[in-house]
Every structure is written in structure tokens, then in C-alpha cells.
Amino acid sequence: MKTKLFLITTFTLLLISSCIKDYTGTIKDSTDEILTKTNFSYEGDMFKFYLELEIENLNEVISKLKTISPNDAGYDQAQKELLEAKAQQVTYNEQVAAIIDIDEVGLKIGPVIPRPPCNCFSLQNSLEYVLILKGDNIKNISVFDINGKILSSSIPEFSPLPEYNNQLLYATYKDLQNIKGEVVIQISKIDNYGDLIDYSFSGYIF
């Protein structure tokens, strides 16, 4: 009787364990293995960082142009530049507003990175992947040191992540794992209107 009870109990525990394993995560070939809190960056976050810097720069330009007096010989030119700066600022703000936060497609894990010692986009040297949304068209990602020497350049090939309904795609960064310190990151992309955008910004790799 005891033997029979032992066998029934053991079978029950094995069945429960199997069900829990199937429910909680035998899907280990998904982002549980691909993405961590420090090994990826999202192009949308990088583009937003760049745009917000440009907006800040335009704020300074606009403030200076507003101080030019109508009695100044360069007043008319200043007014023209002021209108252009304000129009550009509107465009940048619209582009920022159009960027989709990565958590809106269900990614909840980061990245978690220390605050850099400069006004830079912060990255870890464990960086392996760049993420984009479906429909984004990235042509090139290059990384330079502060003297302009190229450290990495690649035309990334993106693959979909099925667990995010293929709305989120990833590609591997090239040769960044041994880089530390301040860098310049340059990205070329095609926007929603089919125009090529080249943008660059300072980064800091820990």
C-alpha cells in the first residue's frame, strides 16, 4: 500500500513539474536568451537622443537671434534665420512625438546603464544587438573614436523576434565589445517619406 501511494505521489509531482515547465518558459530560444538588460540598444532611443540635443541647440540659436535689434544691419537676415530655426524645431518635435517607445511592443527589460560622464548616449561594452521596429529602414551604423578613427561600421541585417509578433527586429553590432569610453555614433536611415537621414551623436561605452 505504501509503495502504491509513493508511486502515485511521485507521478503526480512529475506531472505538475512538467506542466509548470511547459507554462513558464521552455521557450528559452526567445528573447530570454537573446536580450539582457545591457546587451542591446534601441535605434528609436538613439534617434530621440539626437533630436532632443538638436532641439536644445535650436533653443540657444533662437534666443540669440531674438536679441538682435531692428536697428542692427543684420536684423533682416536674423529674422529669416529665426523663422527657419523655429520651423526646424517644429519638425524635430514632430519626429520625437512619432517615435514609439520600445515598451509599447511589450519589451520590459531595460536597458539599464550607468549615467555617462558627458552629455552622451550611454551604452555597455556588453552591447551585442541593435533593435528597430518593423518598417524601419537602417542603412548603416558606424562608430568612431573622438578623433574620427572608425571603430566599427556595418550594414545590419535585421531578424524579427516572433514573441513580439515580428514587430520588433534585431541585428548584431559589429566589433563593439572591446570598446570603452567616449565615441561618436553615426546612423543612416530611410525615413517614412523615403528620404535618407544621416545623424550622429556622442556616445559613452562603459
Image (cartoon, rainbow, N blue to C red):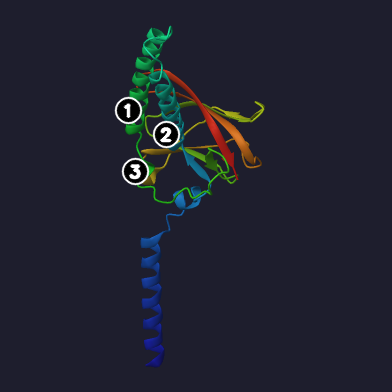
The amino acid type found where label 3 is placed reads: Val
The Cα atoms of the two marked residues, 1 and 2, are separated by 11 Å
The answer to whether residue 59 is visible is yes
Question: Is 90 drawn above or below residue 6 in the view shown?
Answer: above
**Which callout, 1 or 2, points at the residue further toward the start of the chain?**
2
Please report contact status of discs 3 and 1: CB closer than 8 Å, yes or no. no
Check disc 3 and report its element: helix, strand or loop: helix
Question: Is 33 drawn above or below residue 10 in the view shown?
Answer: above
Please report contact status of discs 2 and 3: CB closer than 8 Å, yes or no. no
Q: Position of residue 78 (x, y in %)?
A: 40, 12
Crowding at dot 3, Cα within 10 Å, few <14 / some 14-19 / many 20+, comes out as some
The amino acid type found where label 2 is placed reads: Lys
Check disc 2 and report its element: helix, strand or loop: helix
Question: Is 111 drawn above or below residue 67 in the view shown?
Answer: below
**Label 3, on which residue?**
105
Residue 48 badge: 2
**Quarter of the view holding residue 86:** top left
Check disc 1 and report its element: helix, strand or loop: helix
**Which callout, 2 or 3, points at the residue further toward the start of the chain?**
2
**Quarter of the view holding residue 72:** top left
Q: Position of residue 153 (x, y in %)?
A: 59, 28
Quadrant of the rendering where the C terminus is positioned: top right
Crowding at dot 2, Cα within 10 Å, few <14 / some 14-19 / many 20+, comes out as many
Please report contact status of discs 1 and 2: CB closer than 8 Å, yes or no. no
**Which callout, 3 or 1, points at the residue further toward the start of the chain?**
1
